[in-house]
């Protein structure tokens, strides 16, 4: 796992080694073990290395192919690199190292950009073809590893984080007031935009070609939930059998490492299923849990192990107080590659920071809800179907219902007509459904201190994502696809990478394995989420698999993230300090001139979407102040 950065010159040549050196200096925690900068024609590229595979100097980056044609700076992990080596017909003795990076060079030489389809893992890479003087920037399927870039008529600059990218003197350090509307609404910004003016984020599953002729961005991977007819006829037992084989391979793939591996363990089904499947294949790993407490804090043996310690692995528990959370909020949010508003980021940062001395690589259950169909999807499918069935009643009777569940800044009547005009499977599209409710328009207008015009977009990004769904997609297919492109890729994966790399650690997610995902996305809806409400009616394929493999108490557990606490509680105890962290930010007050008025509410007001936006403002203010963003 590493940090990458570089500059490509479209016109005149220049020595950019000192600039790239400054950029990778900001990535030191992503790669404390080694560093390197190389210049090749129009490209200057750098790397900070965290050694996971081959701890020797043979893994130094940037790495060049044996024939000298290709140069790569690679951030990530290719879990199936040994399978690719065999597919290429290369003997281990013919390689200079045991790294996955060297396999990437060989794969690119054989297949070019098609090599990406052969890879299972997470990555962001910069690969330069010196013969064609062409640079390729590529990101993994879902965007587990970040990659930001800025281009003008002279240069294209790229880096693994926004703070590293703005070290290039020509990259703006000013917030983009247009995208901040989306940031306050959703608590994150959806690719390809970012919070900084003119700076773009290469979306997951995309590749960017850079040459003297300009740039060309293309999608190389498109996740589509699309039920296959042949799956409809299969029995639950046969589906579970295939799921078991794929899940076991996905989880064991994530153990490839030359450094210690551990598991972030909650009391829910996702992380515990990873623990169970590894144990079933004789692979025990140390686990780390997280508990809120009013007493002393610290890391100790977990006497309330959710699996009862029956698999022989060791569980350690991190106990955290409210004071700990408030004190550590600043260093945690400063570390973000880009700001996001999610309190779970703080909990994950604290857990990895305290567990880091015991392991370098951590597995986690991220992606399980989005891919398998978790959260409140059964309740929400039922609720939206019910709303659609009654919105034809006289408007005075349904006005509040439409205003609550059909998002947008158009009139209530306009939103009602839009919902009535689509077939049932497009109900999520017409309601602009998101797993987390957007900030209401009235609150956004208070923050902006002006009325919200139709041109401001509000949820225009959500409309775009729903429009990309296949015509054949069911309502559930559409809900999950948009969830993957929003809450998973732009929120969870963004902060997960940030908080792990700030401790020079790597986070791996078996539920995002290529082959497991392809299988699950083809499952019929009834193997993912029921149309009837209830927490036991989500992630059905995993619940079927869990029967006899996990304790019943874990399978029936209500969905919970790490218990990071809520902001209303923290506001009641530390309200003055938290408000000062927001109002003391010049950048936040500039883009949200009404923020002081918005913060005048009683702490109990900041729940649901209001709490999320409050986390987002805290994150943004702390991050901007640390990195000189105005």
Image: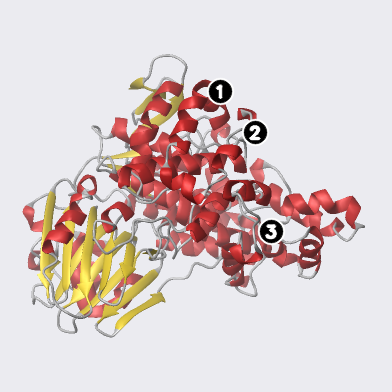
The residue pinned by badge 3 equals 408
As drawn, 242 above or below 497: below
* Secondary element at tag 2: helix
Residue 437 visible from this viewpoint: no
Front residue (pair 235, 45): 45
Assess disc 2: are there few (<14), some (14-19) or many (≥20) residues with their C-alpha within 10 Å of its C-alpha: few
Residue name at image x 16 percent, y 76 percent: 42
Whichever of labels 3 and 1 marks the residue nearer the N terminus, that label is 3
Across and down, in percent, residue 16 comes to 14, 66
Across and down, in percent, residue 571 comes to 54, 27
Residue name at image x 18 percent, y 72 percent: 106
As drawn, 428 above or below 580: below
Front residue (pair 193, 346): 193
- Asked whether, in this view, residue 45 is left or right of residue 254, the answer is left
* Secondary element at tag 1: helix
Assess disc 1: are there few (<14), some (14-19) or many (≥20) residues with their C-alpha within 10 Å of its C-alpha: few
- Give the quadrant of residue 44: bottom left
The residue pinned by badge 1 equals 572
* Secondary element at tag 3: loop
Residue name at image x 54 percent, y 63 percent: 521
As drawn, 401 above or below 220: above
Front residue (pair 585, 418): 585
Across and down, in percent, residue 239 comes to 55, 58
Residue name at image x 40 percent, y 47 percent: 495
Q: Residue furthest right?
A: 394
Whichever of labels 3 and 2 marks the residue nearer the N terminus, that label is 3
Front residue (pair 374, 392): 392
Find residue 605 and name its label.
2
Q: What's the CA distance linking mark 3 and mark 1?
A: 32 Å
Assess disc 3: are there few (<14), some (14-19) or many (≥20) residues with their C-alpha within 10 Å of its C-alpha: many
- Asked whether, in this view, residue 254 is left or right of residue 239, the answer is left
């Amino acid at each position: 796992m590493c940090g990458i950065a570089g500059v490509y010159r479209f016109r005149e040549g220049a020595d950019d080694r000192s600039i790239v050196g400054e950029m990778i200096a900001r990535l030191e925690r992503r790669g404390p073990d080694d560093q390197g900068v190389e210049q090749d024609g129009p490209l200057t590229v750098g790397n900070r290395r965290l050694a996971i595979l081959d701890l020797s100097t043979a893994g130094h980056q940037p790495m060049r192919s044996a024939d000298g044609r290709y140069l790569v700076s690679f951030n990530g992990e290719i879990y199936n690199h040994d399978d690719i080596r065999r597919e290429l017909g290369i003997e281990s003795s013919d390689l200079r190292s045991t790294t996955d990076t060297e396999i990437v060079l060989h794969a690119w030489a054989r297949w070019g950009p098609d090599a990406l389809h052969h890879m299972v893992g997470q990555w962001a890479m910069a690969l330069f073809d010196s013969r064609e003087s062409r640079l390729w920037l590529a990101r993994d399927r879902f965007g587990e590893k970040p990659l930001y870039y800025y281009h003008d008529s002279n240069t294209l600059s790229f880096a693994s984080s926004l703070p590293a990218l703005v070290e290039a003197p020509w990259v703006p350090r000013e917030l983009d007031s247009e995208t901040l509307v989306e940031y306050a609404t959703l608590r994150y910004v959806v690719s390809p935009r970012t919070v900084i003016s003119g700076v773009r984020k290469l979306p997951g599953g995309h590749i960017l070609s850079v040459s003297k002729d300009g740039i060309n961005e293309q999608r190389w991977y498109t996740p589509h939930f699309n039920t296959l007819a042949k799956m409809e006829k299969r029995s639950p037992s046969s589906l579970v059998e295939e799921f078991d084989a794929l899940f076991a391979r996905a989880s064991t793939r994530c153990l490839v490492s030359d450094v210690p591996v551990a598991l972030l363990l909650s009391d829910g089904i996702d992380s515990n299923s990873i623990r169970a499947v590894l144990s079933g294949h004789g692979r025990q790993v140390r686990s780390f849990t997280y508990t809120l407490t009013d007493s002393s804090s610290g890391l100790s043996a977990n006497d309330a192990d959710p699996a009862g310690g029956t698999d022989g692995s060791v569980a350690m528990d991190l106990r955290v107080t409210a004071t700990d959370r408030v004190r550590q909020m600043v260093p945690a949010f400063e570390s973000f590659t880009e700001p996001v508003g999610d309190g779970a980021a703080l909990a994950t940062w604290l857990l990895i920071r305290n567990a880091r001395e015991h392991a370098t690589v951590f597995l986690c259950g991220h992606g399980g809800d989005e891919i398998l169909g978790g959260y409140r999807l059964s309740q929400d499918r039922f609720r939206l179907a019910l709303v659609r069935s009654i919105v034809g009643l006289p408007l005075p009777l349904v006005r509040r219902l439409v205003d609550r569940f059909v998002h947008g800044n158009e009139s209530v009547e306009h939103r009602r007509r839009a919902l009535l005009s689509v077939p049932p499977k497009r109900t999520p599209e017409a309601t602009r459904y998101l797993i987390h409710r957007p900030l209401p328009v009235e609150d956004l207008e208070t923050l902006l201190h002006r009325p919200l015009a139709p041109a401001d977009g509000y949820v225009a990004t959500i409309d775009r994502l729903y429009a990309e769904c296949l015509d054949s997609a069911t309502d559930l297919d559409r809900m999950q696809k948009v969830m993957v492109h929003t809450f998973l890729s732009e929120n969870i994966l963004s902060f997960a990478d940030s908080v792990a790399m700030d401790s020079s650690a790597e986070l791996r997610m078996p539920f995002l394995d290529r082959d497991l995902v392809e299988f699950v996305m083809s499952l019929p809806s009834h193997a993912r989420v029921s149309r009837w409400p209830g927490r036991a009616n989500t992630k059905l394929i995993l619940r079927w698999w869990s029967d006899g493999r996990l304790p019943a108490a874990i399978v029936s557990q209500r969905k919970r993230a790490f218990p990071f606490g809520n902001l209303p509680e923290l506001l009641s105890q530390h309200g003055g300090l938290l408000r000062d962290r927001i109002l003391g930010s010049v950048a936040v007050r500039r883009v949200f001139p009404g923020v002081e008025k918005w913060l005048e509410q009683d702490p109990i007001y900041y729940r649901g979407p209001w709490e999320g936006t409050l986390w987002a403002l805290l994150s943004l203010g702390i991050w901007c102040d640390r990195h000189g963003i105005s």
